[in-house]
Image (tube, rainbow, N blue to C red):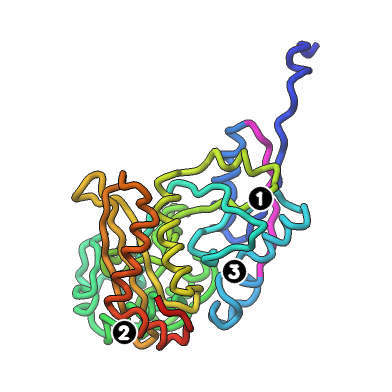
Amino acid sequence: MIPSSARNQPESPSFILASRGSTLALWQANFVADKVRSLGHGVEIKTWKTTGDIVQDRFLHEIGGKGLFIKELEEAMAQGAAHFAVHSLKDMPAKIPSRFALAAVLKRHQSADVIIFKNNVWPKLGLTPGCMINANLLKTLGPMTVATSSLRRQSLLAADCPNIKTVPIRGNVDTRLKKLEAGDWHALILAEASLERLSINDVHAHRLDPCWFIPCAGQGALAIETLKASSAFDTVSQLECPETRRAINIERAVLARLGGDCTMPFGCLVASDSQSPGTLIARAIVLANDGCSASAICSMNINTPNVEILLEDALIDELRKNGANNILEKLGINIRI
């Protein structure tokens, strides 16, 4: 017999989580679903194919941008077929539709990029396993072909490693790793977080020094998107990481002020300064397709009032002083900062 006290308790609502169907997307969906279940709610994961998943033979900037990975999931939420969706923040446009909200940003995983060398190439390079690679070291490894579809990564390599040729690649993580071994390239660049989340540790991966190879805005962070009026909003917002939210707010705000989307080779990373506790250090770079760039580095005490706005403004000021408007003109972006 059920006690009367239990009969009177309202049941916790169950939610439908919208996800893409790739291995990485499903890992992310299950990661978040488990956290929501720990709050006492049921979660069912349903998958949708997005345009970004279907069209694999062209660059994202040729078919509409990073929003193509989230459009169908937003439509599912708008139609009531799902309550929330989980995204890699790096795949989200700088601005989302006004009826939606980032209800939670989770604690960031690794934010850097890694270069993964082909199995029969790595032994010839003389690298210490796991060593970090900067531009000077990469140049000494000789001419090579590196696969990446990111304009930011292509432009960073063009600027500092002219002996490296880049080739485009699309597909999920497993597909890209298989293409690397089957193709005639020497290496592949991926977000380190993708290897971390999928527990891939049997590849020859080396972190690219993020002081040089600045990651894209939001890289390594997961975001939960809902309709602003969603019944899931209050629940999933409990998963918020304030430190990560502060960092990605600055990164994405700078990108938005530059008029950025995935057609812009842009990197920005805000993190605690390991050499100075209590200090935020922010780096940003905007590049033209020929490798010309404008960069900025700023720091600020974490307890400074309005630190987000002030650090955003400081990055924009430094980028302006260092020639960002010339880069924007080269990119055909009709915005001046």
The type of residue carrying mark 3 is Gly
Q: Name the quadrant of the C terminus.
A: bottom left
- Taking 63 as reference, is 286 left or right? left
Between label 2 and label 1, give the one nearer the viewer: 1
Q: Which mark sits nearer the N-terminus, 2 or 1?
A: 1
The picture places residue 258, in percent across and down from the top left corner, at 44, 73
Residue 228 inside the magenta-drawn segment: no
Query: Considering only vertical position in the picture, is 80 above or below 71?
Result: above
Image coords of residue 16 (percent x, y): 71, 47
Residue 44 falls inside the magenta stretch: yes
Task: Tell me residue 84's x, y (percent).
Answer: 65, 50
Q: Quadrant of the N terminus?
A: top right
- Tell me if I can see residue 201 in this picture: no
Label disc, if present, on residue 292 of the rendered structure? 2
Q: Pointer 3: residues within 10 angstroms few (<14), some, or many (20+)?
A: many
- Which numbered disc flags the more N-terminal residue, 3 or 2? 3
Name the residue at 56% across, 45% down: 32
The span shown in magenta is 40-50
Q: Residues within 10 Å of mark 2 (few under 14, many from 20)?
A: some
Whether residue 307 is visible, yes or no, is yes
Name the kind of residue labelled 1 in the image.
Answer: Lys
Q: Determine the CA span between mark 1 and mark 3.
A: 19 Å
Q: For numbered disc 2, what is the local secondary structure?
A: loop
- The part of the image, by quadrant, that contains residue 309 is bottom left
Quickly name the residue at label 3.
67
Determine which residue is flagged by label 1: 228
Residue 288, picture quadrant:
bottom left
